[in-house]
Image: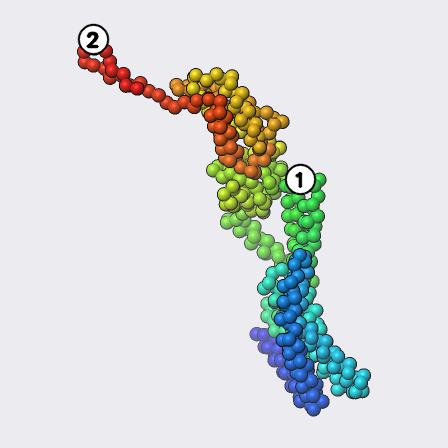
Amino acid sequence: MENEFSTATELTTEVQGFLVQLQMFVEGLLRPYQLWQVAIAVGVFCTAWMINTLIGPRLHDWMRTLEGRPKWQLRWLLILHRRIHLMLFILLIWMTIWFMREVLNTFPSRTYLLSIIGTISAAWFAIALAVQLIRNQTLRRTIRIAGWIWVTLYYFGFLEATSAVLDKAAIEFGDFRLSLLAILKAVIVTGVLFFGARLISGTTSTRIRENEDISPSMQVLAVKFIQMVLYGSAFFIGLKAVGFDLTGLAVLSGAIGVGLGFGLQKVVSNLVSGVIILLDKSIKPGDVISLGDTFGWIDSLGARYVSVVTRDGREYLIPNEDLITGQVVNWSHSNDLVRLDIFFGTSYGCDPHDVRRIAIEAASSVSRVLSAKAPVCHIVGFGDSSVDYILRFWIKDPTGGLTNIRGNVYLALWDAFKEHGIDLPFPQREVRILKDDPDERPVIID
């Protein structure tokens, strides 16, 4: 109780000190030479706004005429176009400061406030450009606003007083003390480290994927391992940098262990299965697989699931555990060669030697059928109405689809059989109607 009362008293004292400093700052602005500088800054702002109104639309129309330029150039031109007003304000205010000091021989104290405003504006512009490297729009906006606030407090001399107030706004449990200042520092330091980890991870991942000597599955494993190490290091280094005691994570790790034992078995199983898939190279991005009724090619390997895209554009997210425990047909595990079989039949009046030759020629005429592994045709049986054949051929691009290539071969067979007079049989039956008189001949109906 005594500690809480002392903390509240210290916080009240710091807030009062901050308010006194703010009051002195406002009183300083009310002095005549300070008011003149405020009026000059407002006039420069209005002038920059009018110039932006005149040249802004013309620059926008000029940007529309730029065709064939790289996207990054057009993106940065658009970013600068949105900040023309601020750029003009910075340029005009520093020109005004130079004119007052060099031409009018004004005392530096009469342009001190203008120089602070110009410096803050330039810093705002630099921050606005720097945060464009961040892709997430919400995070980018948050960091930009936080940077503007920090710069403003720093140049107006309120940074130390604000830091003191935030440091006194704290909660204490025994030896543990958590203040708003520590939280802000932790967020900033961890955010910067995560940004650096993401930048390094992205660059490293690009180089790994461009290395053709590394198999696709090992590329994914290496990228995942690097991301895990970088992000984990950034997290723990960020906590350590702000003075957080990492030994307190022992309790958290124990809680995680209990959670794994009760409710996260499937999650851990999928994670471990994903690592096994990457290590044994049983499947990799680009492989064509069949799992149950799902047929498609692997688009990506995730930590928890595998993305399989089918021919109709559907994307199935299959848990890694199913690929380990279930039967998976990998059409392109060791190579991309796939043999397909189609069955057909011809009437008994057709010469089977001619049928086999014509069928092989028809299959060979289809573009996707390999000529290096020539198609073959065999008789597999004598049916009730037809001589049954099997036609086997090879392709090397299963990602292009299997149903469509079978359809093309069937269509080529139809055209070839029609051209050479090969008959495709259909079931025929004879129905005999027996009479009651055994000496009477039965009636046959075709």
Tell me the tag on residue 215.
1
Q: CA distance from mark 1 to mark 2?
A: 82 Å
Q: State yes or no: discs 1 and 2 in contact (Cβ < 8 Å).
A: no
Q: Is residue 47 above or below residue 280?
A: below
Mark sitting on residue 114: none
N-term mark: 1 or 2: 1
- Pointer 2 local density, CA inside 10 Å: few below 14, some 14–19, many at least 20: few
- The residue lying at 63 percent from left, 41 percent from top is 217
Residue flagged by tag 1: what amino acid is it?
A: Ser
Pick the front one: 157 or 92: 92
- Can residue 343 be seen here? The reply is no
Extreme-top residue of the structure = 439
Say whether residue 411 is left or right of residue 72. Answer: left
Residue 5 visible, this orientation: yes
Q: Amino acid at mark 2?
A: Asp
Label 2 belongs to which residue? 439
Closer to the camera in the image, 325 or 55: 55
